[in-house]
Image: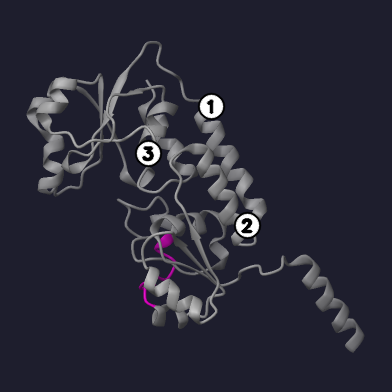
């Protein structure tokens, strides 16, 4: 009996990757989404932004998963064996968790689609589920490959609340390139008058909430009525993920 139990234990060790996580907490909206896409069965809790449908692509799934505050005490109470986080935010909490020997994986967020593929593989490996990355990446690549490119040059400006624009090396810049659009901005802040002076063929704005703020009201300025506009849900581009390819589809001619 003892020998059989020992053999079973050795078999389980051979099957289970060393250090594979089974109780995962995510403290960042962007890592929340990768955790849900790659290993929902391992999640103990997500950040408090995960259920917001205006910000989170995985909000429908996240409503069934507990949330946790970004405090060391709250996270420790969940007994995680892995905490996912970004390279920014909640750093004091993460340091406190590391001092308690909790495994922390911090990730830099990419600004293009090859970077999304790499990050997908990195997080899948951290979760002990590397085989789950390839289907997501393949679906992203197929979506991008199917996007019809414009038949002539089209200039575009991605205009955010408060007048911020997308630079070439930003995620939105990568979305514009994948859609075959020429970015007419450089990441500078641009008011309505400057935008009208530059006058792109297409103005890309985020879906605004039902009750806009002063920061979003400028996106609806009557003076912009003569410029073609397309909207993108912020949940597709606020965090980089395989789902960001859907933003490219929305910009296709």
According to the picture, the residue beneath numbered tag 3 turns out to be 170
Find residue 185 and report its horizontal and vertical position in percent: 27, 28
Nearer mark to the viewer, of 2 and 3:
3
| Lower position in the chain sequence, tag 3 or tag 1 | 1
Between label 1 and label 2, give the one nearer the viewer: 2
Of residues 189 and 24, the one drawn nearer to the viewer in this rendering: 189
Tell me, yes or no, whether the two marked residues, 1 and 2, touch with CB atoms within 8 Å: no
Q: Is residue 93 positioned above or below 235 on the image? A: below
Q: Is residue 219 magenta?
A: no
Magenta stretch mostly in which secondary structure?
loop
For numbered disc 3, what is the local secondary structure? Answer: loop
The quarter of the picture where the N terminus appears is bottom right
Q: Considering depth in this image, is 111 or 34 the residue closer to the camera?
A: 111
Residue at mark 1: 145
Is 104 placed left or right of 46 in the picture?
right
Q: Which residues are magenta?
A: 62-71
């Amino acid at each position: 009996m003892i020998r059989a139990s020992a053999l079973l234990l050795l078999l389980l060790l051979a099957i289970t990757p060393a250090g594979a996580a089974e109780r995962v907490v995510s403290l960042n909206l962007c890592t929340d989404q990768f955790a849900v896409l790659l290993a929902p069965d391992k999640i103990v809790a997500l950040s408090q932004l995960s259920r917001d449908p205006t910000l989170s692509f995985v909000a429908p799934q996240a409503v069934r998963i507990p949330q946790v505050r970004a405090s060391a005490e709250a996270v420790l109470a969940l007994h995680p064996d892995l905490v996912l986080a970004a390279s920014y935010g909640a750093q004091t909490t993460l340091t406190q968790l590391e001092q308690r020997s909790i495994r922390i994986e911090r990730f830099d967020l990419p600004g293009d689609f090859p970077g999304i593929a790499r990050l997908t593989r990195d997080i899948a490996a951290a979760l002990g589920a590397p085989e789950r990355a390839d289907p997501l990446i393949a679906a992203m690549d197929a979506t991008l490959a199917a996007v019809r490119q414009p038949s002539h040059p089209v200039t575009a400006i991605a205009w955010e609340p408060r007048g911020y624009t997308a630079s070439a090396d930003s995620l939105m810049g990568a979305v514009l390139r994948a859609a075959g659009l020429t970015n007419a901005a450089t990441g500078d802040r641009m008011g309505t008058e400057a935008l009208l002076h530059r006058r792109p063929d297409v103005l890309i704005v985020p879906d605004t909430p039902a009750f806009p703020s002063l920061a979003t009201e400028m996106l609806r300025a009557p003076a912009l009525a003569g410029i073609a506009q397309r909207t993108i849900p912020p949940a597709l581009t606020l965090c980089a993920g395989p789902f960001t390819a859907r933003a490219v589809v929305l910009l296709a001619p």
